[in-house]
Image: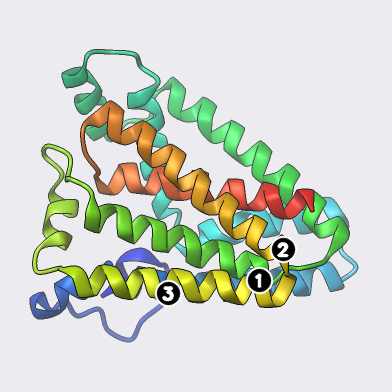
Amino acid sequence: MSLGMFSAFPLPTRQWDDACRDLALPCLPLVGGLVGSLWWGAAELLCESGMHTALAAAAIALAPFAATGFLHLDGYMDTSDAALSRQPFEEKLRILKDPHAGAFAVIMLAALFTLQFAACWAIAEKGELLALLAVIAVVSRCCCSLSVLCLKAMLGSGYASMFKQGTGLRHKVFVAALAALAVTAAVLYAGVWGLVVASSAVLGYAAAAAFTYREFKGISGDLAGFALVISEICGLFALAAI
């Protein structure tokens, strides 16, 4: 269910089982592990291929979005449109649910791709510590899962409310344990730099989630997707800087 909803990987069957609905969010970091592993593998191949750095950087930048079918970019654009509109709360909610892309969505998407490309260029030039890409993908999704599980659902958010049903402490502990495991792996692999990259992803998510929670008085799938995208770009910039 998690793979079918949160990734673009081809599956032999996509069967929805309501009895397992409470496991969809806790399994999101596992999907992140698969996305991150492919991101890492693609980066290793591209950096070793002899391809021009600019082309390699573009492919690395787009790889995680392609692996998820550009799912989280939809939430990023919708949230950007609504949050930057500076309209009253009710109008922001209407904009958030509007399927059309507005000016702020386009501007923020262009800014994101520019920053993502720049960070990936720096990463591709060095070609080091690329396994931390997998850590970024896992940690960002741990934060995403925990925020939806722990925070109040936004008014009218069907997905957030639906996926929280039947969840409890054990689900949150499981996700927190996966996050701790990912951070530990980062530290064992890259020492203090692994901690810096993982912490940057966590802090990026926390800042974005706090902003959207204050603006929209709750959490939703779109808002969580926005924070996940911010988390990953923060992790990328930390990796590019070290």
Disc 3 from disc 1: Cα separation: 14 Å
Residue topped by disc 2: 192
Disc 2 from disc 1: Cα separation: 6 Å
Residue topped by disc 1: 187
| Quarter location, residue 112 | top right
Which badge, 2 or 1, is on the more N-terminal residue? 1
Q: Classify 101 as above or below 233.
A: above
Label 2–label 1 contact, CB within 8 A: yes
Nearer to the camera, 68 or 90: 90
Q: Is 222 left or right of 218, judged from the image as shown?
A: right
| Quarter location, residue 199 | bottom right
Q: Is 187 left or right of 81, judged from the image as shown?
A: right
The colour scheme used here is rainbow
Label 2–label 3 contact, CB within 8 A: no
| Quarter location, residue 113 | top right
Q: Amino acid at mark 3?
A: Leu
Task: Identify the secondary structure beneath mark 1.
Answer: helix
- 3 vs 1, front mark: 1
Is residue 24 among the parts visible in the rendering? no
Disc 2 from disc 3: Cα separation: 19 Å
